[in-house]
Image (spheres, rainbow, N blue to C red):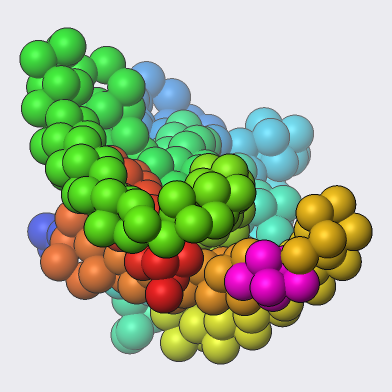
Amino acid sequence: MAVKASPAARRIPFEIAAERATPRVPVVAPTATAGELRRVMEGRRYESASHIVVCEGERFAGVLRIEDLLAAPEATPIGTLMDREAPTVAPGVDQEVAAWRAVQHGESALAVVDAAGRFVGIIPPHQLLAVLLWEHDEDMARLGGFLKRSSSARQASVEPVRRRFWHRVPWLLLGLAGALLAADIVGWFETRLQEKLILAFFIPGIVYLADAVGTQTETVVVRGLSVGVSIGRVVWRELLTGLGIGLALAATAFPVILWRWGDADLALGVSLSIFATCSTATVVAMALPWAFTRFDSDPAFGSGPLATVIQDLLSINIMKA
């Protein structure tokens, strides 16, 4: 009896099961005995020997754990020791799916088998652990809304000052331009402000509320897009939520302003401005992250500053109207 060499795996793109699998493992026929297998394995080096693959010809038949082999009497047939129900995956299955399949079955290694039932390789324990850690890190980066991939998130965290500067300053320069434009817009209705100076006191508060509503929506949308949730599944819920929030804030502001300043026109104007700015903030906060993602650009750097500029200008124009 000899330990047979398994067929070499084809070169397949990264991040699929076959790329993580190795054929350099013990492969044995089910008719061999435990003693024969131990003697053949002695003195040989494998990339992984935690699991012995059992094949009938080239077809995968099952898996034998090394601990079961070491504990078995010499004359015990491998066919009676092996696990015939061992989980397997196809070569093209995503590596994350493969790793979770092993976890769900309580396995520390996983066999890769092609459509014809031929053994391709074993994903050994250290590779499964690497996949789980990699995918966990990547998912956390995506859920945090940082970047599309964890490697990019790490790069952004450790990149030199010069690159940090050029990644961020263009968007902030847009913000500066927006602030200057906002000053001009406020100046355009200076006469109206002079007639009712108290309106100026509400501008910072209304702009802040709109930005806060937009930031909440933007966070939800960026996180959703980064983990594969389409904008279509988010847009209506967020639109209705933005309208509801704007209505609630406006309804709260109206009686308070009316009671505090005793001016119904002022209370109505400010309340309508709050409703309109909060509602538009939701639309802007959804549109920009989606647009950045569509153009394969990172929404973490650009969508926040740009959304703030656009929303501030819209808020001031709404109040002007």
Q: Residue furthest top?
A: 161
Residue at (33% x, 85% y) in the render: 116
Residue most extreme to the front: 195
User: Residue drawn at (71%, 41%), measured in percent from left and top?
Assistant: 68
Residue 223 horizontal/vertical position (percent): 49, 57
The image position of residue 312, as x and y in percent, is 38, 54
Q: Quick check: 197 left or right of 240?
A: left
In this rendering, the answer to whether 268 lies above or below 132 is below
Instruction: Confirm whether the magenta stretch covers residue 166.
Output: no
Quarter of the image for the C terminus: give it. bottom left
Dominant secondary structure of the residues highlighted in magenta in the image: helix
Between 164 and 256, the one lying in front of the other is: 256
Residue 263 visible (yes or no)? yes
Give the residues drawn in magenta, as a range: 264-269
User: In the depicted view, which residue is nearer to us: 216 or 36?
Assistant: 216
What residue sits 45% from the left and 87% below the top? 232
Q: Is residue 311 visible?
A: no
Residue at 17%, 11% in the rendered image: 161
Name the spot of residue 230 as percent of width and height, x first: 43, 79
Count of marks, rendered view: 0
Left or right relative to 65: residue 141? left
Question: 48 or 215: nearer the eye?
Answer: 215
Vertical order, 122 against 227 (above or below): above
Please say whether residue 266 is one of the residues in the magenta stretch. Answer: yes
Q: Residue 251 location in percent, x, y? A: 80, 73
